[in-house]
Image (tube, rainbow, N blue to C red):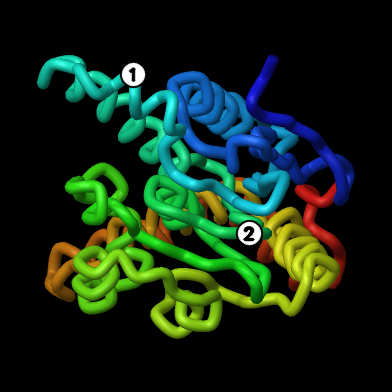
Amino acid sequence: MSSLNITHGGYGGRVATITLARADMRNAFNDEVIAELTAAFTGLGARSDVRAIVLAAEGKAFCAGADLNWMRSMADYTREENLADAARLAEMLRVIHTCPKPTLARVQGDVYAGGMGLVAACDIAVTVESAGFCLSEVRLGLIPATISPYVIRAMGPRAAHRYFLTAERFSAAEALRIGFVHEVAADAQALDAKVADIAQALAQASPAAVKACKRLVRDVAGRDIDAALIASTVEGIADIRASDEGKEGVQSFLQKRPPRWLE
């Protein structure tokens, strides 16, 4: 039985939704979930008919981190086995983060440990007000190593110092304040409405431009503004202007008609 549900809907079926479907296990990770998420984002990322991907979950928790039974099975792992296991989780997060399609986390409940990495790896995150967030690893004598590149980029190093070290649970309002999520909705109905609004905006954008923008953010963030960076941004705008979708976008704007990618 699959740990995920994948559906297509809205905007001509251009928005795909991947739903974590282990509500009884608080949507916690195990080998199967990691493999299925990796395959799902890889497959949907390669489809020309998909313009955006929503990552959602069933039940009271979005993702509680590692499955307890999975953790028990790892208790006697050798260092080599631990390296292989962590590499699979790292690859899943990399696949989500570098997915050619824009990704949106719909956070309907609590997010703990590795689940924080899932949210942070997505481009955009929207949460319900009642959700709670926690980087709980140090309580178990562990560190949030594999998820850290994504979580630190999402919340910033200063906030990471506090929440990595204290393992405090924090609110949706605090997640918004530190930049970990982009918006907080009052309830499930408002959450769905906000996700639909953002998904519509993503589905209407130029697919090639969205892909290039994702790469642009990764390439520019944190770099010094020097001659090399300026040169790469000059090349970036020149290349997209000369592309088919770039030309079509400008012409459709000047001619006051919808661009062909919306057909």
Q: Is residue 27 above or below residue 171?
A: above
Q: Amino acid at mark 2?
A: Gly
Q: Residue at x 20, y 49 (%)?
A: 143
Front position in the image: 35 or 53? 35
16 up-or-down from 87: above or below: below
What x and y, as percent, mark residue 156?
A: 28, 73
Disc 2 designates what residue?
Answer: 109
Can you identify the residue that label 1 sits on? 73
Find the distance from the CA under tag 1 to the CA under tag 2.
27 Å
Name the foreground residue: 42 vs 261. 42
Coordinates of residue 183 in the picture (x, y in percent): 61, 76
On screen, residue 64 above or below 73:
below
Residue 77 locus on image (x, y percent)? 19, 17
**Which residue is at 59% across, 42% downward?**
26
Which secondary structure lies at badge 2?
Answer: loop
Looking at the rendered structure, the kind of residue marked 1 is: Ser
Residue 185 showing in the rendered view: yes
